[in-house]
């Protein structure tokens, strides 16, 4: 009997261990998640302290009032570990009048993927030291409408090169040229650096980027001719207006088949633009306040055009009757050119 019991006991013990292991693993996972969630709460409190207890956060980021930090202002969580409390994946804190530097503790939020600090009063250089530790996981960074200044760092390509999809640095005071290092952000789909004081040429990499869909560089001091190697075939919106660009629009722009918006107004561009009126996806085309010359083409097949502004150029000849075939056209500006003939 003892032999039988001994021989059966080991398999039975193995079965019990196999049954209990998932429960233990699940308990360990829940404990880990709870620890992470608790750590995020402490990190948020440290961030609030570093920012000088801003009044907009003081009332909301208060564990005595609301224990679940995922319910605090501007905080988004995922997961349900720790008694239904998840880990922080997003901080959205626009318009809070933040003035002190971004604390390094922001990157102690180990699951942070999106950070929006737009419309504040953050000043000084690009906060590289605070943000580079987040490099492995940030997907979206919005620092627009602040007072950040100075040149963009040459190491900016290290800022989440494998994950960054959306980067908005618009409406600051950045100066100098756009670093080539931006090309290292290979997953970017949206890049906005408009309304700064950037100089130099439009970077060639920007029009070769394979994943960019929205590119805004308007209202800077960019100069020189547009790049002629244009292979960013996924571009949907392109705005280089209010700069100092010269030369002609390269024929390679014809390859931007997905383009719905092209704004190049208030530059010093020259030449003719007949092919643009055959682009079947364009909805908004603004080329006003340049030096474009020549006649408008008699054949206009850009049937999706809604907005067309060609004002304040040096265009000549008659206004084509084909404009009457643009059934979607709602806004047309042709004033201050050298057109002749009658408008039918």
Image: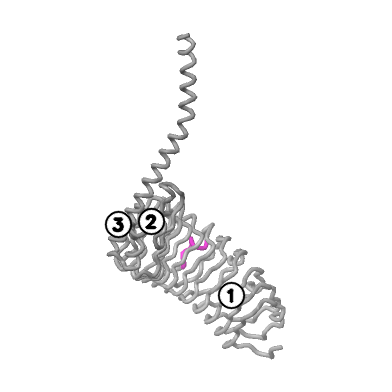
- The residue under label 3 is 46
* Eye-nearest disc, 3 or 1: 3
Q: Circles 1 and 2: CB distance less than 8 Å?
A: no
Between 195 and 205, the one nearer to me in the picture: 195
- Crowding around mark 2 (Cα neighbors within 10 Å: few <14, some 14 to 19, many 20+) is many
The answer for how far apart the CA atoms under marks 3 and 2 are is 13 Å
Q: Which residues are magenta?
A: 202-207
Decide whether residue 240 is among the magenta residues.
no
Mark 1 residue element: strand
Residue 24 in which image quadrant: top left
Which comes sooner in the sequence, label 3 or label 2? 3
Q: Quadrant of the C terminus?
A: bottom right
Instruction: Please name which of the two marks, 3 or 2, marks the residue nearer to the observer.
Output: 2
Q: Main secondary structure of the magenta part?
A: helix
Depth order, front residue of 330/298: 330
Give the percent coordinates (x, y) of residue 116: 41, 63
Q: Residue at 55% across / 61% down in the picture?
A: 232
Direction from residue 194 to residue 321 in the image, left or right: right
Badge 3: few (under 14), some or many (20 or more) residues near its Cα, within 10 Å?
A: some
Find disc 1 in the rendering and name its residue.
285
Q: Identify the mark at residue 146; answer none if there is no mark.
A: none
Sequence-first tag of 3 and 1:
3
**Residue indicated by mark 2:** 69
* Mark 3 vs mark 1, CA separation in Å: 48 Å
The reply to whether residue 164 is in sight is yes
Instruction: Give left or right: position of 173 versus 18.
Output: left
In this orientation, does residue 198 appear? no
Give the vertical position of 126 relative to 18 (above or below).
Answer: below
Q: Residue at x 50, y 75 (%)?
A: 241
* Relative height, residue 249 to residue 312 (above, below): above
């Amino acid at each position: 009997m003892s032999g039988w019991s001994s021989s059966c006991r080991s398999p039975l013990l193995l079965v019990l261990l196999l049954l209990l292991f998932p429960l233990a693993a699940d308990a360990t996972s829940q404990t880990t998640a709870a620890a992470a969630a608790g750590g995020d709460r402490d990190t948020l409190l440290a961030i609030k302290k570093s920012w000088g207890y801003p009044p907009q956060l003081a009332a909301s980021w208060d564990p005595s009032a609301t224990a679940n930090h995922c319910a605090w202002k501007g905080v988004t969580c995922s997961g349900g570990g720790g008694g239904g409390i998840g880990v922080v994946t997003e901080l959205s804190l626009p318009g809070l009048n933040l003035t002190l530097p971004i604390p390094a503790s922001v990157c102690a939020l180990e699951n942070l993927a999106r950070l929006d600090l737009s419309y504040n009063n953050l000043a000084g250089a690009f906060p590289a030291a605070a943000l580079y530790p987040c490099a492995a996981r940030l997907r979206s960074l919005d620092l627009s409408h602040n007072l950040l200044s100075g040149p963009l760092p040459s190491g900016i390509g290290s800022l989440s090169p494998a994950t960054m999809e959306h980067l908005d640095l618009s409406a600051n005071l950045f100066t100098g040229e756009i670093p080539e290092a931006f090309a290292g952000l290979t997953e970017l789909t949206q890049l906005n650096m408009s309304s700064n004081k950037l100089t130099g040429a439009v970077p060639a990499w920007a029009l070769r980027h394979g994943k960019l869909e929205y590119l805004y560089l308007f209202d800077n001091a960019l100069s020189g001719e547009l790049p002629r190697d244009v292979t960013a075939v996924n571009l949907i919106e392109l705005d280089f207006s209010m700069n100092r660009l010269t030369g002609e629009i390269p024929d390679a722009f014809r390859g931007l088949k997905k383009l719905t918006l092209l704004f190049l107004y208030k530059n010093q561009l020259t030449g003719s633009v007949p092919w643009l009126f055959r682009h079947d996806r364009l909805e908004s085309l603004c080329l006003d306040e340049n030096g474009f010359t020549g006649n408008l083409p008699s054949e206009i097949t850009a049937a999706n055009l809604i907005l067309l502004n060609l004002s304040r150029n040096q265009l000549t000849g008659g206004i084509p009757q084909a404009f009457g075939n643009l059934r979607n056209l709602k806004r047309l500006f042709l004033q201050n050119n050298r057109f002749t003939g009658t408008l039918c």
